[in-house]
Image (spheres, rainbow, N blue to C red):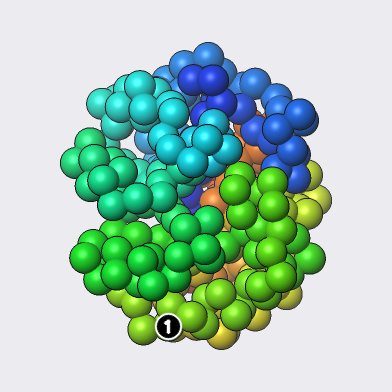
Amino acid sequence: MQIWPAIDLLGGRCVRLQQGDYQRDTVYADDPAAVAKQFQEAGAAHLHIVDLDGAKEGRPVNLDAVRAILAAVDLQCELGGGVRDEATIESLLDVGLSRLVLGTSALKRPDWFRDMCRKFPDRLVLGIDAKEGLVATDGWLETSSVAAPELAAQFADAPLAAIVYTDIATDGMLQGPNLPAMRDMQAAVDVPVVASGGVTTVADVEALAAAGLAGAIIGRALYEETITLPGALAAAGGSAARS
């Protein structure tokens, strides 16, 4: 199972939100590129980046910080937040990102998103953020009436790189992941599912690996040191990695 340490960008700085609330942010570092280098030195092969400003604005905002991260490390990096048109997809991939996470546009323009998946096969990730099982959009500021598995099923035929499934209730709370929801999502689709939200301990990583998840995103737990990156990587190693 892959481990994706997370860097969330707000105003060019590395922060974490609690339950997606922009008013409940904690600043962890002023230099996100330095944080990325620390992750690489600790053994990371992957990096999950979120442009929180971009998610609200509907366009990438923290591009300078993203470019600095890409220049500082040799990791497979993915970016989510504000990726909502073809020109943005092309420009971000050209910058050197390995793959991009799209959520709002997939829900609101499914035909367009399916076309983009075909145009950029295995480079786009479906980001599904759920509140009580319902898909949230626009930087988690809006909640739809669409159930998370229902949205995933719409793109069963698309050449997705993965699905990142975030349970907003557990995100940033250091109380463990929503394991049943993650297990059910991975069982429902053939696409690799990366769990996000609440991963706090080595036991959480082991449980997700045992449930067959393809990966786990870890954010606040790394910054608060309730888990170490080497510990998470070792726990994930008990399950065969899925590409």
Q: Does residue 145 appear to the left or right of 241 in the view shown?
A: right
Residue 86 at x, y percent in the picture = 28, 52
Residue 13 at x, y percent in the picture = 53, 20
Toward the viewer: 40 or 48? Answer: 48
Residue 220 at x, y percent in the picture = 66, 37
Toward the viewer: 89 or 231? Answer: 89
Q: Does residue 21 appear to the left or right of 117 in the view shown?
A: right
Q: Which residue is mark 1?
A: 156
Quadrant in the picture for the C terminus: bottom left
User: Is label 1 in a helix, a strand or a loop?
Assistant: loop
Can the viewer see residue 89? yes
Residue at 52% across / 35% down in the picture? 57
Residue extending farthest top = 30
Residue 166 at x, y percent in the picture = 62, 58
Can the viewer see residue 42? no
Vertical placement of residue 97 versus 30, above or below:
below
Residue at 52% across / 76% down in the picture? 152
